Amino acid sequence: MNLKNKAIHSSVKVFELLPPLVDTDMVADRQDKKISTQQLVKGLILGMKKDVETIKVGDTKVISLLNRIAPKTAYNIINAKKEYIKLK
């Protein structure tokens, strides 16, 4: 059972945030498209003000729609093969 289902009979409101890759120290070496933490927080606050239960920020809006129309294409975009430096 997830948190949203557990809170259904309480006064607690549960929001789900679907962020894209966020520019943090953890992904600093990746060259992928990223959003800033400020953009993420702005999207979260805007979604909460609009009372949107599932808040999609940045490219997750487009990918979510594409996944409904062409799931294989969405999968291939998200899982594109990339070259990464392997840790020793």
Image (cartoon, helix red, strand yellow):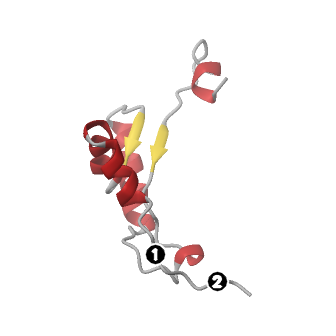
Residue type at tag 2: Lys
Q: Is residue 15 left or right of residue 69?
A: right
Q: Quadrant of the N terminus?
A: top right
Image x and y of residue 21, in percent = 45, 64
Q: How far apart are the alpha carbons under marks 1 and 2?
A: 12 Å
Q: Based on the displayed image, in which of its 4 quarters is residue 12 positioned?
A: top right
Image x and y of residue 17, in percent = 47, 44
Q: Secondary structure at mark 2?
A: loop
Image x and y of residue 15, in percent = 49, 35
> Is the residue 71 above or below the residue 25 in the image?
above
Q: Is residue 15 left or right of residue 38?
A: right
Identity of the residue furthest to the right in this view:
88
Residue at 59% in and 20% down:
5
Viewer-nearest residue: 63 or 73: 73
Identity of the residue furthest to the top in this view:
9
Marking on residue 82: 1
Viewer-nearest residue: 45 or 4: 4
Q: Secondary structure at mark 1?
A: loop
Marking on residue 4: none
Alpha-carbon neighbours of circle 2 within 10 Å: few (<14), some, or many (≥20)?
few
Viewer-nearest residue: 51 or 32: 32
> Is the residue 47 above or below the residue 80 in the image?
above
Residue type at tag 1: Lys
Marking on residue 86: 2
In this orientation, does residue 57 appear? no
> Is the residue 61 above or below the residue 69 in the image?
below
Image x and y of residue 4, in percent = 57, 25
Q: Are marks 1 and 2 in contact (CB under 8 Å)?
A: no
